[in-house]
Amino acid sequence: MSLSTAPPPPHAAPPGDTLSPRNQEKSHALGLTSATGLVIGSIVGTGVFTMPAVLAGAGTMGIAVLGVVAVGAMLLAVLFGQLTKRVPNSDGGLYAYSRHEFGDFAGYLVGWCYWIQSWAGNAAIVSSWVFYVDALFGFAHPSGMENFGIALVGLWVPALINLAGIRQMAVFQNITVVLKFFPLLFVGIVGWAFVEKAHFGPFNASGGSLYSGIGIAAGVALFSFIGVEAAAVTAKRVRDPRRNVLRASMIGTAASAILYVVVTAAVMGLVAHHTLINTGSPFVNAFDSIFPHSTWAGKFIAAIAVISGIGALNGWTLIVTETSRAIAQDDMFPRPFAWTDRNGTAWFGILVGTALPSLLMLWRYTSSSGLTVFTYLVDLTVVTVAIPYFMSAIAQLTFLVSRRRRVVGWLLARDLSVAGASVLFSMWVTFASGYQVVYQALVVILAGLILYAFLNARRQRLGEAAEPVDLPDQVPAEAGAELS
């Protein structure tokens, strides 16, 4: 029996977590529509506005790679839905799956990795968001501290919305999803009427082997789909999670995948290849092709990117908070992260989860080495999220090959295919990231294990974890005589 099936220890549920029926309803404010909006808003951030240019560097093969990654993301969406249906306490999503199947240590490891990538990813989003704010308001040469001030707005406005409550966060998320989804879809539909075949570059434009081209495309494609697990991580906030987590994950991921593929292909056909690979704002060029000599295209795209980024930051602020709250409630993370207000909002987790990327951005804008460190942390998000993906997949695989359930043959084959493909996909994500990033991810993991040593020792003292039995502390008489 897994440790997660045992009654929670007395220290795992802080007093603030005891909610009235009305407040419990507030804490489960994400219906299917809002949960789907959270998934879309978490996947589709500011990256989509630069992705066509990066993929064009690989060639038209980038569209195919994006499609393959989209299929992998859909498999993960199905996997998380299956795990939420099966795991009795799925609070925390990926953390809960690993803890249920493999115990406390695996659960902590997954939770730590996912928490790190979540707030580091917020720094990546807000960094890109700052550039679009500069473009929208015409800030030609802003200083580092001016950009840092803009970044603080991008990080703390979503934090304040989340502090106001889950219902307010959900409303804001749904509005931003609509505002950014339809303009992008406009490019993906209307833009095809202006596509020119000559604009598409060669199949492999990397200048190297097919493998190197796939590597260029895979990196940005993989990063773009982080967020498929949003509904699973926030399962406690979702109404009827056993049904709606699967539905929201699949609908949100499928909608994002269709948008990505259609829009990226359209932009590649709207903008000449040599222009596309040398621009940081491909959608401005795409709108210029649809509306020649327009004076408003740049401002319009910048405004959409700003809305998209603030929506993504809003959703990811919740995800960062829910990840740390779930682990802390099991007394496997510092307890303040489980502190909640009368509406069930983990306010301490919001503050810390926003302060960390704020400090990272301060480093970015005041230190010459900050950009290098920041770039490394952006790359780390891919690897550190691949580990929770991998652990979730093998948790399901362990269950399927065990004797704990009776299965019909074709259902077993289907579920094994989903879990097996998810394992391979997660391994590919790690492999495609490169050895340097994997090395740095290992350093991050080792740092987390130091914290676990102290947390586990505390849990053993409180009787929340089994203490290992050591040999008696005795010294033989002969050895004592020699030592004297």
Image (spheres, rainbow, N blue to C red):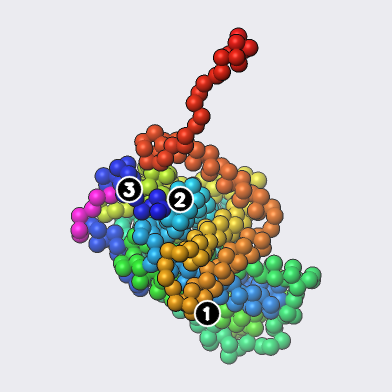
Q: Amino acid at mark 2?
A: Gly
Q: Is residue 101 left or right of residue 437?
A: left
Which residue is depicted at the point 23% across and 57% down? Answer: 23
Residue assigned mark 3: 8
Q: Where does residue 183 sit, x and y in percent of width and height?
A: 48, 78
Which residue is depicted at the point 64% across and 74% down? Answer: 65
Looking at the rendered image, the disc whose residue lies closer to the viewer, 1 or 3, is 3
Q: Is residue 212 magenta?
A: no
Residue assigned mark 2: 103
**Gap in Å between the C-alphas at discs 1 and 3?**
42 Å
Quarter where residue 25 is shown:
bottom left
SS of the residue under disc 2: loop
Q: Where does residue 411 sit, x and y in percent of width and height?
A: 46, 77
Which residues, given as a range, are shown in magenta?
A: 17-22
Q: Amino acid at mark 1?
A: Ile
Residue assigned mark 1: 258
Q: Residue furthest top?
A: 484
Q: Is residue 20 magenta?
A: yes
Crowd band around label 3 with a 10 angstrom C-alpha radius: few (<14), some (14–19), many (20+): some
Crowd band around label 1 with a 10 angstrom C-alpha radius: few (<14), some (14–19), many (20+): some
Quarter where residue 465 is shown:
top left
Sequence-wise first label, 2 or 3: 3
Question: Mark 3 and mark 1 in contact (Cβ < 8 Å)?
Answer: no
Residue 217 showing in the rendered view? yes
**Gap in Å between the C-alphas at discs 2 and 3?**
14 Å
SS of the residue under disc 3: loop
Count all numbered tags in the image, as a single digit. 3
Q: Amino acid at mark 3?
A: Pro
